[in-house]
Image: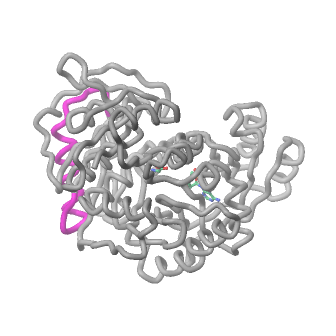
Amino acid sequence: MNILILGGGGREHALAWAVLQNPKCDKLIVAPGNGGISQIAQCAAIEPTDAGAVLDLCAEETVDFVIIGPEAPLAAGVADSLRDAGILTFGPSKAAAELEASKSFTKAICDACGAPTARHARFTEAGPARAHVRLKGAPIVIKADGLAAGKGVIVAMDEATALAAVDDMFAGAFGGAGAAVVIEEYLTGEEASFFVLCDGETVLPIGTAQDHKRAGEGDTGPNTGGMGAYSPAPVMTDAITRKTMEDIIKPTMAEMVRRGVPFQGVLFAGLMIDDGQPRLIEYNVRFGDPECQCLMLRLGAQALDLMLATAEGRLGEVAVTFADDHAMSVVMAAENYPGAYEKGSVINGLEDMPETSFEICFHAGTTREAGRFVATGGRVLALTARGDSLRDARDKAYGLVDRVDWPQGFCRHDIGWRALPD
Ligand code: AMP
Ligand code: GLY
């Protein structure tokens, strides 16, 4: 079958790699792709949010199945356009993608189905929002209601920071995403990422991970898209996983069906675990990046079968084969990311990187220019490895980091520190 993946980050490189492990794939196109993806698949220079361009590409290349990687095309309704055109598609409708695109929509779903989450209130004007901050005090969390590329959340440890965040959001710091602001209770505990596939009805867990969102070692510094991840997350014990399914995921999916917006695709629940109790921090309607890099290495070729079963409404007929393995992904980013960073530096050492189901260098923000790889993004590479133990996966992933010759890049050296404290 001919397959199209939309997106061009490390997540999409990992999806592309996994899809190519499966003999069902005859031809793979990635749009727009990146320098690393161009080495394994055909890349098409179109905007993934442009439904017309995506449909034209599907017609030209006789595409049978589309996998949508990032949230932007989902929130723009590209999955709806594809399904209307009769093309099999992995990814939720625009209406179901509200689970990520609108924090207040998710809160309303949680309220309706009783899923445990932080207490919250929504404001459309600065005055009442400021009064609420003063009433509740710090620590407190201020969130832009809409999509803000992962940047619209301020965890304020003091009242002044919270009030400044409210003012910034209503002053347009996050554009339209901040026209409404959600203020919520500060949760403590350990965070974990939980991934399930859903075909509208059946829900199938496909793995857990822990991400490192801060730019600096010891989880300090500014929030990023994610500087490294590992899977599985030890905090997600069988008991907590069961509780998450029964208290949070299944009720959410049932409430979506009740509202006439069944969810089809991958649901990524960001959880806070405290005292044996999981609470929902947020939903994303796509794979996490770099969590996906770990999951794809662990799932391998079956990832395509699982995504096909999701799109075809057959999840009840399939099972996931989990190996007793561990994976880690270490992100290399451009110096000063997530602040302003330079583009265009040359990365050496990538040509002879291993590319096996145990060690692989996924590209996130690179392009190929005159036979060399050049950095074009903030997060640039995701060095990913798998082993019998997390320690083994970590040693292999950092072994890959050591092979990269890129003076303008940096990585965190402590990915996995909670699970490997020494
Ligand atoms: P989000 O984009 O909603 O995942 O938020 C980004 C990060 O902010 C999360 O990964 C958490 O570390 C933190 N965060 C969000 N909401 C809360 C909360 N209610 N309590 C504590 N930390 C939070
Ligand atoms: N790594 C977190 C995310 O993809 O949102």
**Residue at 24%, 73% in the rendered image:** 324
Q: Is residue 244 left or right of residue 90?
A: right
Viewer-side residue, 333 vs 372: 372
Residue 411 in sight in this render = no
Instruction: Please provide percent x and percent y for residue 42.
Output: 26, 33
**Residue at 45%, 35% in the rendered image:** 54
| Number of marks in picture | 0
**Residue at 60%, 78% in the rendered image:** 247
Q: Is residue 284 left or right of residue 38?
A: right
User: In which quadrant will I find the C terminus?
Assistant: bottom left
Viewer-side residue, 366 vs 188: 366
Residue 334 drawn above or below residue 247:
above
**Residue 383 found in image quarter:** top left
The residue segment tinted magenta is 386-409
Viewer-side residue, 117 vs 273: 117
Residue 153 in sight in this render = yes
**Residue at 51%, 49% in the rendered image:** 83
Instruction: Please provide percent x and percent y for residue 168.
Output: 73, 35
Q: Is residue 157 magenta?
A: no
Q: Residue furthest bottom?
A: 239
Instruction: Please provide percent x and percent y for residue 177.
Output: 69, 39
Instruction: Please provide percent x and percent y for residue 95.
Output: 64, 52
